[in-house]
Image: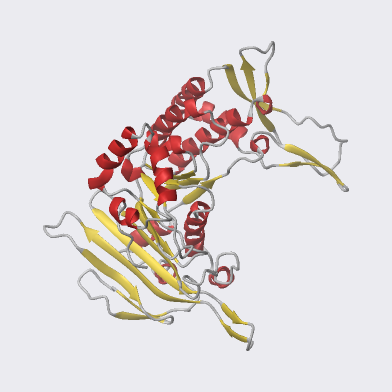
Amino acid sequence: MASLNKITIKGFRNIESASIDLKDITCLLAPNNYGKSNVLAAIQFGRIFINAPADKKVILMQTETAIPINKFVAGKPFMLFLEGSLDENRDFQYSYQFDWYKNNVANGHIIDGKITNEFFKIRDNSKEKPKFATIFQRNDSEIAKYLPSPTGRCDKPLAINPCDLVINKLSNFDDLFYHTELESVLKITIRGIDSLSNPEYHFAPQLLIKKEGPRINIGDWVSPYLFFLKKEDKDTYDYLLSAIELLLPNIESFEPIQSGPHLQVDEGVPFAYPDQYDIMVKERNNNQTTRLQYLSTGSMKILYLLTCLVRARKEGVQLLTIEELENSIHPKLLLSLLSIIKTFLGDTKLIFTSHSPNVAKYLSAPQLYVGLPSEKGVVDFRTIKPSKVKSVLSIAGAGDMSLGEYLFDLMLETESDSSLIDFFFVPKKEA
């Protein structure tokens, strides 16, 4: 199964260029309005584009909410770059670029979006001097060149639709010796975890009353998932249960259940209500068990997050993204939650956003991408230079501040002294 090690995105909203080396857990740390959400949205957009059919790609290249309007980014193409491992011995690089749809209202001139660049490379690390070998290359919207055989050169021409990707077309060539590798990249899954503005909707079916009669809205998946997890993978379920007990000590018992339909219908009615699932919980100070929906938002969020992690690991998801992980979670639980997340992830990696200085206490410097102010109004996330980590920690300690508190002060100070950015943070690569 392929894994992801690095993601770079360009030309999305106010993102000129953003590059993230993925650790097991990576945090985008910044105050509000520094572009954290835009980075996650760009990653999701870029991944969705890969597997979309050509007609959907046309629509995606016209996405108004994604097309850059920042004057320093406007007109620049969208680019996604993925780097990772195919197996223990081989790494890959895959990238594509497209021009956005343009509509010049002044003269009525419309330019359709088109894919202009794409490549796929593989490196065999078992060789004495490993280097990336090009499998296919595209520098034109309608012509690409690909490697036809292990001993050949990457020079066989391939006609390609300007609204389709080479990787999509070549994946249909079953006889290519790197067909499995193409499929591995196409199967890379990046999944966003809901921020849980309405967490109760994730745990039990909601009954909707409509003109044609009542029906069950199946938005729920957590309750049946945990019910079958307990039956089919007791070890994983017990591990999940122990994590719940650690993070939510007020819960005395926790039981996913299956129940029959609650509504009765006359015989002959052509509608069958599905089985329903729920989670029954006994809290320490309650005199009876209740449905999970009686728990606090923070408790439901923790359970939902842990279940997402279990599911992602079992389904081989490469990357999870979540916004504002710390919302609705008590600061004292954050360290325990991050430790448990790390054990649950397996080979899955997680990017989360945060505007809480507390997060910096529990992550290493390479895991923290700090949002920096920009005179151009573009997104700028960077890590602290390895050679400056001790200095930053020392300065923070001398000021009786945590690392996170000092970083937030530093973010504000850099607005008046941009030299601090170059001094403390890894230089930003040119877009």
Do we see residue 237 in this rendering?
no
- Of the 4 image quadrants, the one containing the C terminus is bottom left
Q: Is residue 210 above or below residue 107?
A: above
Q: Which one is in front, 147 or 242?
A: 242
Q: Which one is in front, 377 or 397?
A: 397
Q: Residue furthest left?
A: 128
What residue is shown at x 34% (from left), y 67% (from top)?
430
Do we see residue 253 in this rendering?
yes
Rendered location of residue 223, percent (x, y): 61, 32
Q: Is residue 255 above or below residue 348?
A: above
Q: Is residue 424 above or below residue 173?
A: above
Say which quarter of the image contains residue 27.
top left
397 vs 79, left or right, is left
What residue is shown at x 42% (from left), y 44% (from top)?
409
Q: Which one is in front, 399 or 290?
A: 399
Label tally: 0
Rendered location of residue 111, percent (x, y): 55, 83
184 vs 394, left or right, is right
Rendered location of residue 340, percent (x, y): 42, 30
> Colour mode?
secondary structure
Q: Is residue 324 above or below residue 339?
A: below
Q: Residue furthest bottom?
A: 107
Rendered location of residue 115, percent (x, y): 46, 75
What residue is shown at x 51% (from left), y 60% (from top)?
45
What residue is shown at x 29% (from left), y 74% (from top)?
148
